[in-house]
Amino acid sequence: MAVPKCKTSKSRRNKRRTHQKLTAPNLTTCAKCGEAKLPHHVCPNCGTYRGRTFMKTEE
């Protein structure tokens, strides 16, 4: 079984973990209604994608 020979310092441990952070998703605005939406997805507010209606929404 592997046992560490020396203690890993807080600095070295934190340097290794710098890439394990969460990032906020990129949002774009819908061309029809102006609401925020994920890129390349149907707008959840108005149901359109690239100028075509794909979902019927309650208005």
Image (spheres, grey):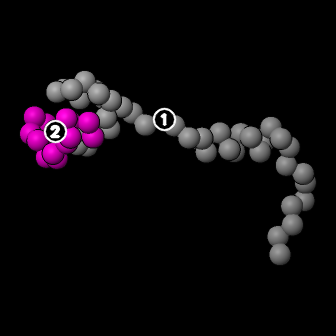
**Magenta residues?**
44-59
Q: Which residue is mark 2?
A: 48
CA–CA distance in space, label 1 to label 2: 23 Å
User: Which of the two residues, 5 or 42, is positioned nearer the viewer here?
Assistant: 42
> Can you give x and y, in whole percent of width and height, for residue 46 in the image?
20, 36
Magenta stretch contains residue 40: no
Identity of the residue drawn at 77% across and 45% down: 13
Identity of the residue drawn at 39% across and 33% down: 26
Most distant residue in the bottom direction: 1
Mark 1 or mark 2, earlier in chain: 1
> Can you give x and y, in whole percent of width and height, for residue 41 in the image?
25, 43
Q: Which mark is residue 16?
A: none
| Amino acid under disc 1 | Ala
Front: mark 1 or 2: 2
Magenta stretch contains residue 47: yes
> Can you give x and y, in whole percent of width and height, for residue 33 in the image?
21, 26
**Quadrant assignment, res 16:** top right
54 over 24 or under it: above or below: below
User: Which element is circle 2 on?
Assistant: strand
- Left or right of 17: which side holds 44? left
- Left or right of 16: which side holds 22? left
User: Which of the two residues, 54 or 18, is positioned nearer the viewer here?
Assistant: 54
Let me know if residue 39 appears in the view. Answer: no
**Quadrant assignment, res 44:** top left
User: Which of the two residues, 18 or 59, is positioned nearer the viewer here?
Assistant: 59
Identity of the residue drawn at 25% across and 24% down: 34
> Can you give x and y, in whole percent of width and height, for residue 57 in the image?
19, 42
Identity of the residue drawn at 80% across and 37% down: 11
- Left or right of 35: which side holds 12? right
Q: Which residue is mark 1?
A: 24
| Amino acid under disc 2 | Thr
